[in-house]
Amino acid sequence: MKNLAKSCFLLFGIYLATCYGMPLAHAVGIGEAAPDFTLADSAGKKHSLSQYKGKFVVLEWFNEGCPYVKKHYESNNMQKLQKDYGAKGIVWLSIISSAPGKQGYSTAEQVNAKRGEWKIASQSTLLDPQGQVGKLYGAKTTPHLFIADPKGTLIYMGAIDDKATSDVADLKTAKNYVAAALDQAMSGKTVAEAATVPYGCSVKY
């Protein structure tokens, strides 16, 4: 009976993953090598994680239709982070893993228009319409953020901050996990909160 129960549970998990495009589990963990990948950005330029070895890299999952993403962009919170840390040599890459026909999917032209409209300051927006990189990292929400150190080791994964709401007013009292992780790591310290629970809209695989 126990084996039967385990089999049923496993099959149910596979069913959910198949029907809803949910990653079965995180494919990467803190302290492990961040998986390499190659994706084209909205300008057609290809980016590989390995090409940025020697630098801190932030990967930010993005969906322009998600109210949680809008909270951070329409308030200019995300752009300020991108600019501030970009000025310090941090590579910040936005990634869209929404599948064609689902919320957040955008053509390169639409991405470029949105980057201009919102004055997005990440280095590039990478297109992942098949969801391969999103699933490789186990990205669950928009936003969902990952940080790799100069050696290519994952040092942070999770939420942008500790206010899991779409209310802009909450930004005033939020603790920004990403900023804290970058500041600590750049100072040679261990990231105090390396893994947090991401919040936002589900990635539309």
Image (cartoon, helix red, strand yellow):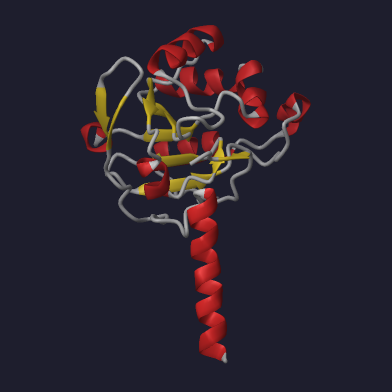
Query: Along the line of sight, which residue is nearer the eye, 81 or 94?
Result: 94
Q: Position of residue 113 (x, y in %)?
A: 47, 9
Q: Position of residue 137 (x, y in %)?
A: 40, 48
The mark tally for this picture is 0
Residue at the image point whose x is 46% and y is 35% from the top: 99
User: Which quadrant: the N terminus?
Assistant: bottom right
Compared to 144, does 135 lie above or below?
A: below
Q: Position of residue 74 (x, y in %)?
A: 64, 17
Q: Residue furthest left?
A: 51
Left or right, residue 180 beside residue 165: left
The image quadrant of residue 163 is: top right
Residue at the image point whose x is 33% and y is 47% from the top: 34
Query: Along the line of sight, which residue is nearer the eye, 2 or 151?
Result: 2
Compared to 45, does 23 lie above or below?
A: below
Query: Along the line of sight, which residue is nearer the eye, 88 or 153?
Result: 153
Residue at the image point whose x is 62% and y is 29% from the top: 66
Residue at the image point whose x is 38% and y is 33% from the top: 128
Q: Is residue 192 visible?
A: no
The image quadrant of residue 97 is: top left
Q: Position of residue 14 (x, y in %)?
A: 48, 63
Q: Is residue 150 visible?
A: yes
